[in-house]
Amino acid sequence: MSVTRNNWLTSDTARAGILVAVISGGRPELKQRPTHKFLPRLHDAGVNDIVWVVSDQDAPNYESDGHELVVYRREWAEEYAAGHWLLPGSPEPGSFLGAFPGREYACLEAERRGCWSVLQLDDNLARLAFPRGAAASFEIGRRMGQLAGFLDLIAAVTLSTNGRMVGANLDAIPYVKLRVARAGFTYSLFLERVGAGREEWFGPFEDDIHHQFSYGTRADGATSIVLPLLRYMKTGVREKATGMRAHYDHTRSVQLQRMFPESAKINIRAKHSNGKGEARVFHTMLPGAIRNPMVVTDPELFGSVKSRIEDLLIEWRAESEVMTRAKIQARAEGKGHQRFAKSQITG
C-alpha cells in the first residue's frame, strides 16, 4: 500500500494548515541534520509550509536545503528563557539555552501564519519505520510515504481525540501492547495544536517531558498522545556531540525528578555522558505519569486510523515473511546474511 493523494485520512485543508518546523542549533552543515532527507516527501501531502527554526547567531552559517529559514533573535530567546527557566538560578547572558525558545518560536510562527498546528521535528532524525526498527519495517515506512504518512496519521489522531501534543514513538522506547494510540510521551516528532489553550514552553532540559506533563495533568482533560507503532530513530550517541547533546550531563534527569517526584524515577548506570567521564543519571517515566487518558471525540476519523494501522500491520507481516525467507535462502547458499540485510535496508 503506497500512500497517494487519493487515500489520505485527513483533508487537504487540514494538512495545508500545518506548519512543519525543524528546531536546530549548532549544526550548520546539512550532513549534521539528516532530518532534511525526509522533508521533500511532505510536499506529496500538500504540506508546503516547511521551515528551519534557528537563532540569528546560527543563521548566517546554515547550509540551505531550499526550505525557509525562520530566525529568532538571541536577545528575544534570552528574555524568554529568563521567564521560563526551570533550573536553579537564571540563565547567564550568552549561555546555553536549550531547544525550548526555538520550540516556543515555532508555535508563535505557526500562529502568525494562521496554522492550526505545528509539526515539531528534531534535526537529527535518521530513520522512520513501522512498526519497529527492522528491515521490513523500514520498507513499510517508505511505502507509507515516510514523514508524509506519519504526519497524516498523527494529524488524524490529533483531530479525532483530546490530544494537544501527539506524536511518534522513539524506537529505543519499547511498547508492550499493540495499540493505535495512547496517552504517553513523544519527544522528537510530534504535532502540537496552537492558538487558544496552548501551553508555553519551559526549559532548558527535558522541555518535551515538562510540556507533556503540562497538557496531561490539566483540569480540562487535554492530554499528550503517542502512536506506539510509528517509530523513529535518531543519529547515534557515538557521533561527535553537537547541538543539545554537547550540553547533556547528570543535571537533566535530577531536575526532572525534583519537579515531578511522583512520576519520574532516576537511577545511575555504569556509563559515561558524552565521554566526559561522569556517571550517567537516567530517568524513567512511571506508568500513569500522563494522568489524563486519551478520549476519542471523532469515532469515524479515529476508526479510519485504526483501519490504516491494521492494514499496515498485515502488509508488514507479509513483507517480514518475504525478507525472512530470502535471508534463510541466503544463509543456505552460504552468503553473508549481514551483507544481505544491509542491502535490504539501504537499497
Image: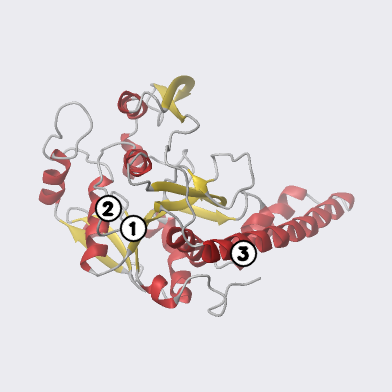
CB contact under 8 Å: marks 1 and 2: yes
Q: Which quarter of the picture shows residue 13? A: bottom left
**Of callouts 2 and 3, which one flags the residue occurring earlier in the amino acid sequence?**
2
Displayed quadrant of residue 1 = bottom right
**Residue 345 image point, x, y percent:** 65, 57
Label 3 environment density (alpha carbons within 10 Å; few <14, some 14–19, many ≥20): some
The answer to whether 177 is drawn above or below residue 12 in the figure is above
Using the image as rendered, state which of residue 81 and residue 17 is in the foreground.
17
**Looking at the image, which residue is at 15% across and 45% down?**
80
Tell whether 169 sits left or right of 201. Answer: right
Q: In this view, does 305 lie above or below 235?
A: below
Q: Which residue bears the numbered disc 1?
A: 193
Q: What residue is pinned by disc 3?
A: 308
At label 2, the amino acid type is Arg
Precedes in sequence: disc 1 or disc 3: 1
Any mark on residue 198, and which?
2
* Amino acid type, label 3: Arg
- Please report the residue visible at 62 percent of the width from the left and 57 percent of the height from the top: 138
Separation of marks 1 and 3 at Cα, in angstroms: 23 Å
The quarter of the picture where the C terminus appears is: bottom right
Tell me the amino acid under the disc marked 1: Arg
Q: Residue 109 at what x, y percent from top left?
A: 23, 62
Q: Which residue lies furthest to the bottom in this view?
A: 6
